[in-house]
Amino acid sequence: MRHSAWVHLTRVASAAGLAAFAAVTLFAPGGGKLEAFYYAFGDIDAYVVVDVPDAISAAAVALAVNQGGGASVKTVVLISPEDMDKAGKKAVDYRAPGR
């Protein structure tokens, strides 16, 4: 199963900090792949899209980068259009409260 995430970095100390993040991503436990990297204006210095094999690997990367102190990471799991189509077809027994 593929897990992709937008990762936004704040408090980036230097370009070297970003390079360290990329290295950690590429060599994360179980493997990982840096898919895209963008610098940004505003409160967030960069957006990084990574492909990791599972949520545990994603958490390991986030922990390593946050503990390193050169940047802070917040991850958001992305859902592919195909998986969203599957979710839309899955039966869920739900009723709004009071109905």
Image (cartoon, rainbow, N blue to C red):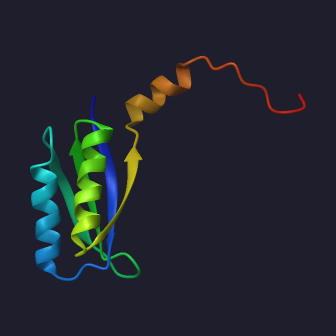
Q: Residue furthest right?
A: 98
Q: Position of residue 61 (x, y in %)?
A: 23, 53
Quadrant location of the N terminus in the rendered image: top left
Q: Position of residue 11 (x, y in %)?
A: 31, 79
Residue at position x 46%, y 32% in the image:
84
**Does 10 sit left or right of 21 as displayed?**
right
Residue at position x 37%, y 75% in the image:
44
Q: Nearer the viewer, residue 2 or 59?
A: 59
**Does 34 sit left or right of 7 as displayed?**
left
Quadrant location of the C terminus in the rendered image: top right
Q: Quarter of the image holding residue 82?
A: top left
Q: Relative to 17, say whether 13 is above or below.
A: below
Residue at position x 16%, y 74% in the image:
17
Q: Relative to 47, say whether 16 is above or below.
A: below
Q: Relative to 86, say whether 58 is above or below.
A: below
**Does 94 sit left or right of 18 as displayed?**
right
Q: Relative to 30, say whether 61 is above or below.
A: below
Q: Residue furthest front?
A: 67
Numbered circles on residues, count? 0
Q: Quarter of the image holding residue 66?
A: bottom left
Q: Position of residue 4 (x, y in %)?
A: 30, 44
Q: Quarter of the image holding residue 90?
A: top right
Q: Position of residue 94 (x, y in %)?
A: 72, 24
